[in-house]
Image (cartoon, rainbow, N blue to C red):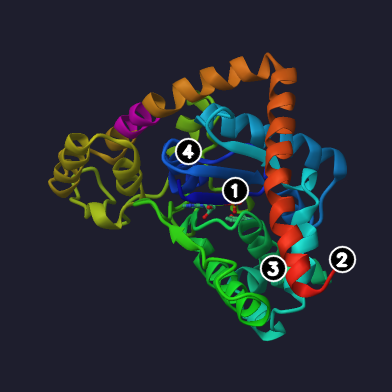
């Protein structure tokens, strides 16, 4: 069975961009691959944060992932800081990674522009990401489109290490994209992202979701109820494509083009489709939250298994590099 690895930052609860772009795919992949899923708290500390807050967000993320359908008996789910080999391998990779490559990363440029003083950890973020993946010698990495550049760098690092210390030791990991590789935020302006406040959260209550959907941006050509629209330019239509059955998506497109429906009608149907997807997830989240001991034990078992595998790789890496 081929191995996959993916990571997610503990940014509190998941939003449906993370879910539709990545995590929903993980839930299916865990049955087909030997799967490692990691809550990357060492990545999260590259921007300013509060310790108590981070701890709570890490627990919330674990809860959301389990509620979304990750099954600890099928996959290895763990928290990055419980497996110290991640930072150990990242240090090694830092010695091989050209500064220029790091400075060129779009995510770095974006995040750095928001900080007054830029920590080196923000620059080296993708090196830690390469270590995450290569520590498990994973072949495939299921992520959203925004991670492709980081993954390219992981491949470069694998290639460099192999050329210097051991041909063929690391495979070059490949991205595994979903059809919904980029979900736009409700503002219709940028990708759905926690930091932009344009999200629908995975565990959000239906009434609160509706309050957000009502004012969400649609096709600007539909000023009056009778103005026909172009579904392809409408964010709500793209959410239908990610969440509604094919027949509904087709119906929505026709109603939009002919002004059969107003945008609110269309949003009501989307809200129903969301509920079908999200109600069972919220129910599972309540069950998991009622038994915090089980979640803690599951994460500890995940980390123990991950660490055993990580140590195997580190033994060989250090040996080939002349380290003790
Ligand atoms: P992050 O929250 O940045 O750690 O992202 C976790 C996963 O969700 C990554 O695989 C991202 O590629 C994916 N992701 C984040 N935002 C979106 C979005 N708006 N659309 C699709 N995928 C996303
Ligand atoms: N950088 C990724 C993100 O923001 C999170 C991440 C960290 C990751 N390590 C990873 C993703 C390893 C895939 C593989 O989404």
> In this rendering, which labeled residue sits more in front, label 4 or label 3?
4
The residue under the point 64% across, 64% down is 130
State yes or no: discs 2 and 1 in contact (Cβ < 8 Å): no
What element does badge 4 sit on?
loop
The residue under the point 73% across, 47% down is 80
Q: Quadrant of the C terminus?
A: bottom right
The residue under the point 20% across, 50% down is 227
Rendered location of residue 132, percent (x, y): 66, 57
Drawn side of residue 18 relative to residue 118, left or right: left
Residue highlighted by disc 2: 324
Q: Which residues are magenta?
A: 268-274
State yes or no: discs 2 and 3 in contact (Cβ < 8 Å): no
Ligand 2 picture quarter: bottom right
What element does badge 2 sit on?
loop
State yes or no: discs 1 and 3 in contact (Cβ < 8 Å): no
Residue highlighted by disc 3: 127
Residue 286, quarter of picture: top right
Tell me the number on the disc at residue 197.
1
- Is residue 112 or residue 104 the one in the foreground? 104
Label 4 – label 1 distance at C-alpha: 30 Å
């Amino acid at each position: 069975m081929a191995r996959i690895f993916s990571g997610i930052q503990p940014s509190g609860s998941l939003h449906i961009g993370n879910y539709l772009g990545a995590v929903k795919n993980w839930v299916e992949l865990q049955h087909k691959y030997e799967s490692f899923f990691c809550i990357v708290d060492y990545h999260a500390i590259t921007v300013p944060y509060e310790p108590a807050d981070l701890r709570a967000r890490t627990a919330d993320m674990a809860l959301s992932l389990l509620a979304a359908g990750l099954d600890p008996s099928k996959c290895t789910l763990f928290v990055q800081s419980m497996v110290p080999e991640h930072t150990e391998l990242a240090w090694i990779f830092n010695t091989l990674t050209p500064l220029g490559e790091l400075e060129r990363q779009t995510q770095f440029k974006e995040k750095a522009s928001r900080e007054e003083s830029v920590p080196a950890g923000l620059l080296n973020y993708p090196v830690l990401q390469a270590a995450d993946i290569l520590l498990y010698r994973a072949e495939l990495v299921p992520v959203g489109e925004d991670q492709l550049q980081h993954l390219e760098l992981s491949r470069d690092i694998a290639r460099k290490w192999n050329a210097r210390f051991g041909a063929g030791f690391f495979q070059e990991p490949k991205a595994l994209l979903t059809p919904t590789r980029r979900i736009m935020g409700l503002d219709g302006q940028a990708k759905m992202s926690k930091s932009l406040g344009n999200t629908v959260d995975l565990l959000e209550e239906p009434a609160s979701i509706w309050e957000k959907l009502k004012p969400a941006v649609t096709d600007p050509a539909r000023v009056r109820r009778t103005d026909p629209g172009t579904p392809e330019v409408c964010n709500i239509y793209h959410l239908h494509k990610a969440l509604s059955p094919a027949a509904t998506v087709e119906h929505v497109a026709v109603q939009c083009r002919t002004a059969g429906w107003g945008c609110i009608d269309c949003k009501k149907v989307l809200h129903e489709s969301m509920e079908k997807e999200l109600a069972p997830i919220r129910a599972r989240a309540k069950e998991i939250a009622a038994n915090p001991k089980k979640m803690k034990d599951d994460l500890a078992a995940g980390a123990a298994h991950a660490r055993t595998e990580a140590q195997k790789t580190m033994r060989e890496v250090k040996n080939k590099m002349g380290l003790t």
